[in-house]
Amino acid sequence: MALLPLPLPLPLPPLLLLLLGMLASRAPAQQPATLHERDAAALRDLRASLRDLRGSRFFDTWDDARSPCAYAGVVCAPDDADGDGGGGDSSDTPTVLRVSVLTLGTGLADSPGLTGTLPDSLSTLAALTDLVLYPGRVSGPIPSALGAGLRRLRLLSLAGNQLTGAVPASLAGLPDLHTLDLGGNRLDGAVPPGLLLPDSPSLKVLILANNGGISGEIPDGFASSGLFHVDLARNALAGGLPPLPATLRYFSVAGNAMQGTLDGAFGSGGGGGDDGSASPPPLPADLAFLDLSMNNFSGRIPASVFGLPGLSSLLLSRNNFTGALSVPPPSPQQEWAVVDVSHNGISGEVPEALAAAGSLYVNNNRLSGEVPAAVARSVLAGRMTTLYAQHNFLTGFPVPPAAPLPDSAALCLSYNCMELPSASAADGCPTIGGPLEARPAEQCRSTTTSGGGAGGDG
């Protein structure tokens, strides 16, 4: 049986062809995405205000030959929340982009960074969530309206430059700000209180260290904030230390002018609240790093400081602490990486519980008695790699005859009321001021166990 040939396709009627052509001509063309004009203007201002230091090539890509969203350090995203990016039917309106992340500089170790100033128009990048300026020599003030304009900020880091003036008050109260790092500049004035209080509900990391001029006091409501990491070191803060947030894991106010006792922050060792007064806030159980060194704190160091269960580094040197140390027995899992109470006026004996420290600095105080056997064993076993106990009134270091000192250990017992157990007991001593083997006998006969001034015995 012969197969019939397939019929040829019928041509479309001319009227149908005309209709399809009309529909095709009315189909919207895909419109290219464009950067919001305010953002584009702000980037132009930035390019005019900043420049590469010699050896940096960050701005090489910031030229008119490419879209601003292709510049180094610029990330753009559609912003549906912005109401003035266009109008009319969405099919013929170009997608409006906003700058969401801005990173200025490369951050590479061999890059010297940028110089210049920050323009006020930086505050108009309304969709910005992350703003990072890597270390360099950018100077001048931080735009005062930065926080008022950048309400979506989550990360603001301008550290390691030469910025001057005050920390803008507008940065306090930002609803999503998690990390604020303005350390290593030349800022001055008081910390906006809202940064240390619950006014900034998302703020967890606050770094204002190494500015030199940050002044004022830490507000009493500090304990009610939710901060994890606070570094205010090497500034001009004054006043006492209030109770700390229970959420804290890292806290440093080293190198300021703070004063008073630590009882308000950590209690004096009693139960508290029995007289009808309000109970103190809970202590920060997860606090791992505490640095109060180089201030004017005084009185006894509360035992509760040593009892913080998560504490690894405790730095209290160069204050005016007096009295004996009261250190509760550490828990089995408690291991201090370093305990430094040197250069104070602390008296009494070295607590045996401090044998749990990896490095122990009790030098330049008024300590007396023998070094506890547990501390000596920890040094000889290599668990404690540094013991500085020089410039005290210690009378002995219990060590078995000819017991070798581990090569990794640094031991200094000079200028005490003892014969050094071996030459190695001075091998780890600092060389500043020259070697000192023993304290004069007349000073040892009149050992004063009461508290002294800052620096203990010098």
Image: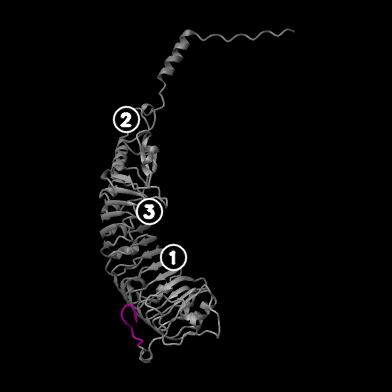
Q: Is residue 402 above or below residue 296?
A: below
Vertical position of residue 402 compared to residue 136: above or below: below
Q: Which residues are magenta?
A: 448-458
The residue singled out by tag 1 in the image is 286
The answer to which of marks 3 and 1 sits earlier in the sequence is: 3
Q: Quadrant of the N terminus?
A: top right
Question: Relative to the observer, which residue lies in front, 199 or 355?
Answer: 355
- Say which mark, if any, is on residue 87: 2
What amino acid is labelled 2 in the image?
Gly
Name the foreground residue: 377 vs 270: 377
Which corner quadrant of the image does residue 237 belong to? bottom left
Q: Earlier in the sequence, mark 1 or mark 2?
A: 2
| Residue 120, quarter of the rendered image | top left
Q: Is residue 141 visible?
A: no
Whichever of labels 3 and 2 marks the residue nearer the N terminus, that label is 2
* Callout 1 amino acid: Asp
The picture places residue 418, in percent across and down from the top left corner, at: 44, 87
Tag 1 and tag 2, C-beta contact below 8 Å: no
Q: Disc 2 on helix, strand or loop? A: loop
Q: Position of residue 66 (x, y in %)?
A: 38, 34
Task: Give the residue type that dot 3 points to.
Answer: His
**Residue 453 among magenta residues:** yes
The residue that label 3 is drawn on is: 178
Q: Which mark is residue 97?
A: none
* Pointer 3 local density, CA inside 10 Å: few below 14, some 14–19, many at least 20: some
Pointer 1: residues within 10 angstroms few (<14), some, or many (20+)? some
